[in-house]
Amino acid sequence: MKLKKLTVLLLVFFSAALLFSGCGTDSETGETDDTTPGEEMVLTYNVGTEPETMDPHLSTGLPEATIMLQIYEGLTRLNENSLPDLALAESVEISEDDLVYTFQLRDGLVWSNGEPLTAEDFELSWKRSLDPELAADYAYMLYYIGGAEAYNSGEGTADDVMVEALDDKTLQVTLEAPTPFFLSLCAFKTYYPLYQPAIEADAEGWHLSADTIIGNGPFKMVSWAQGKMEFVPNENYYDADAVILDRLFFTMIENESTELTMFETGEIDVTHTVPGPEIPRLQETGELYIFPEFGTYYYIFQVEKPPLDDINVRKALTLAIDREAIVTNITQGGQLPAYAFVPSGIPEVDGMDFRANGGDYFAYDPEMAQQLLAEAGYPGGEGFPTVEILYNTSEMHKLIAEAIQEMWKQNLGIENVTLTNQEWGVYLNTRDEGDFMIARAGWIGDYLDPFTFLDMWVTDGGNNNSRFSNADYDRLLTEVRMVDDEVQRMEMMHQLEDIFMEEMPICPIYYYTLPMMIKDYVKGYMKAAVSGIDFKTAYIEK
Amino acid sequence: MLAYLTKRMFHTILAIWIVITITFIFMHAIPGGPFQREKAIPATIKANIEARYKLDQPLYLQYVDYLGNVVRGDLGPSFKYRGQTVNGIIAERFPVSFQLGLLTFTIAIVVGIGAGIIASIYQGRLPDYLTMFFSTIGISVPSFILGTLLMYFLSFRWGLLPAAMWGTPKHMIMPAIALAGLPTAFIARLTRSSMLDVLNQDYMRTALAKGLPRWQIIWIHAVKNAIIPVITYAGPLLAYVLTGSFIVENIFAIPGLGKHFVTSIYNRDYTVILGLTIFYSIILIVLNMLVDLAYTLVDPRIKLIGKEE
């Protein structure tokens, strides 16, 4: 009798549970799988994580940028050389002094829902980005515009921001100072126009559902549920003819091994990364692509902490690291050894790469390193105080730190190097407080210009964890902002890097790469160094 | 009964308040904050963000504010997933973890109890050895290894099931088995030893002597008495599996709640940490209460309220 009661109780519980769980399954894919398979050209890319936010003005990460690249478009769009091509803008007129940009929008631009897209949408969107109430991380990407920083810091008003829709098709922007990469910035997500009625309807949550995400790019989002996004071509896109795919899926698989398995079973066509140890095996498949990434992996010297306050010690430590060994034996992802701070990828006026023009600042040279260490007063490593390498907890960082520890021991005779790992948040805090001696770090450029690597080392800068300070460097940084001659500007950038590498407050290790698996039937996609994969013109050829 | 429930309710609220307070203190004691990035944000922007989320206020005010919101059922906005609320995150992800958890729980209970009973009946014979062999494996092999092995064979080698993701019943099979491995094995052992205890009792011999059929002795008289330890274990187990597992969700790319229990701490996503802790506490407390109620159904000797002297 009593047992029956229990059975009834359990039954009620389970049926309630089933009812509850039923809600979850109703909304899923249904329509997508059973429509004429084989006919459609469908591509699945694993973006690797849930987006932190789908609001282009609030988001900061690369996965989000990659999603938004498919459904939004700015005044410009980056091509495969990471250079800006005019996109929503049909033409741009730049004033003599390089301060006033007048954009003419294309005829008949509309949002993915068919509503007209005007210059005013840009004006309102950019001002929204800067609204202190919105509190966008990347608001500073708009600080190049006159009055922008003041408004964002609460010292000015939205009306003072010097972006104005002269009419439906004309947008005029006045900059604080000549900014040669402004057209590149216009392709960045903080500069995307947003559909104002959706924001007015629900300022907080408009970007949480495919129904209210109204874009203006090559694709439009039709569903977003259970770790999967589905896109179809946006028939209202001005360049809709260039879009070939019938359907595009983005999955959000974080586990790299799972991702690879799903690539191998054919459930996804393009991966967002590859597990490091698998790279040697995958190289033989012919489906592994290693893209350069616009970033540098380096060690920061806290220059206020002895013995790292001695420039010769910093140089000795830097020269005694065999970077070739690190990238071939440890990281194995096609990374390039770094002998400077700014990575390759930035074209100069003469057509040469900034890195090629700048060259290497040093080489692996144990003898020279020993000599420098002796000059610093530690011949053969004798009497060298204990130094600590700090890194955020990760197997890879640990292996690299151990290798460097061993190299310093072998090449310099320094015995007492200790390693410390901290959880990510704690590690960032320690770095900010300068409470370390040597710390691992990485920096990915925001836009294709050396400035994104050099301005962070200004005295007391928020990212200057090395606490490096050089009056000439600071002065040049201020001056270079005012120069509008590209040749002279790049020359000054080289001078900045010269000073920086001469002082060596950091020790470059390698330039990042982005390994991906791409099925050989996937064609026509585009990967620029500073942004994600662009599937606008991708297609499948089996 | 009503008095009992009222008292339990009061204890629940007290327990949750303590949980909130301790979590709040520890959470703010770890260095770092939700808006600390490798790329430092300019000070004015950081000030804007902190003002927006009221992080610029003194901690005790944040604490009082938070308690007020919790009473109103508002767990606040996520700092990491901007635009999303903690209530929204739970509402979206809990159903996924719930489905998977329930399937896991069902497997663990049905297979675990079943295997335990069989093992106890055939004590010292082949079915017993087999059960104990597999349950030893189940207890010692962690879920991520079991999950990876399942994925390798069932999906990579034989192509029977989708490797990962969520949405159809097929997607649930591997993660549910991976999650159920350990509890099934544990329940099997628990049931077996408890059954053996009961089967050696005098009243079992009496029942046998009375001429009752064997199945009746086992099902009606033995299992009912042997099930109590399993019920005790089932409450916390259910709370655990319903709220999702970080590792299994990660391996099978399941959009469940388990991930947030871990990543919210890395992200210093204060409201998510607190919100999930409260959510988990409530589920655990409620299930423990159900366990207590279930005792009285199974064993009338157990009373919820001790007789007052």
Image: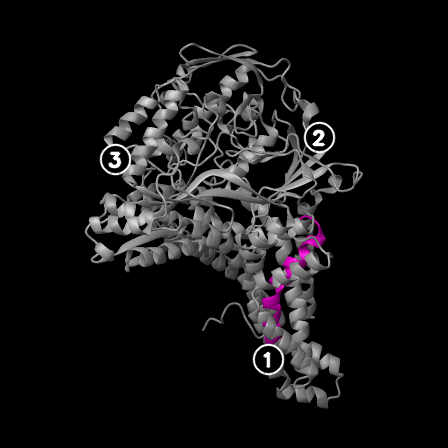
Q: Is residue A368 left or right of residue B232?
A: left
Q: Decide which of B86, A226 is in the foreground and name it.
A: A226
The N terminus of chain B sits in image quarter: bottom right
Q: Secondary structure at mark 1?
A: helix
Whether residue B56 is situated above or below residue A100 in the rendered picture: below
Q: Which residue is mark 2?
A: A244
Q: Secondary structure at mark 2?
A: loop
Asked if marks 3 and 1 touch (Cβ < 8 Å), the reply is: no
Residue positioned most to the left: A377
Residue B14 picture location, percent across and down: 42, 55
Q: Is residue B225 visible?
A: no
Q: Which residue is mark 1?
A: B193
* Same chain shared by disc 2 and disc 3: yes
Residue shown at 45%/73% (left/top)? B309
Residue A332 picture location, percent across and down: 50, 51
Mark 1 is on which residue type?
Answer: Ser
User: Numbered disc 3: what chain?
Assistant: A
Report the predominant secondary structure element of the magenta stretch.
Answer: helix
* Same chain shared by disc 1 and disc 2: no
Q: CA distance from mark 3 to mark 1?
A: 71 Å
Range drawn in magenta:
B166-189
Q: Which residue is mark 3?
A: A469
Q: Nearer the viewer, mark 1 or mark 2?
A: 2
Q: Nearer the viewer, mark 3 or mark 1?
A: 3
Mark 2 is on which residue type?
Answer: Ile
Q: CA distance from mark 2 to mark 3?
A: 52 Å
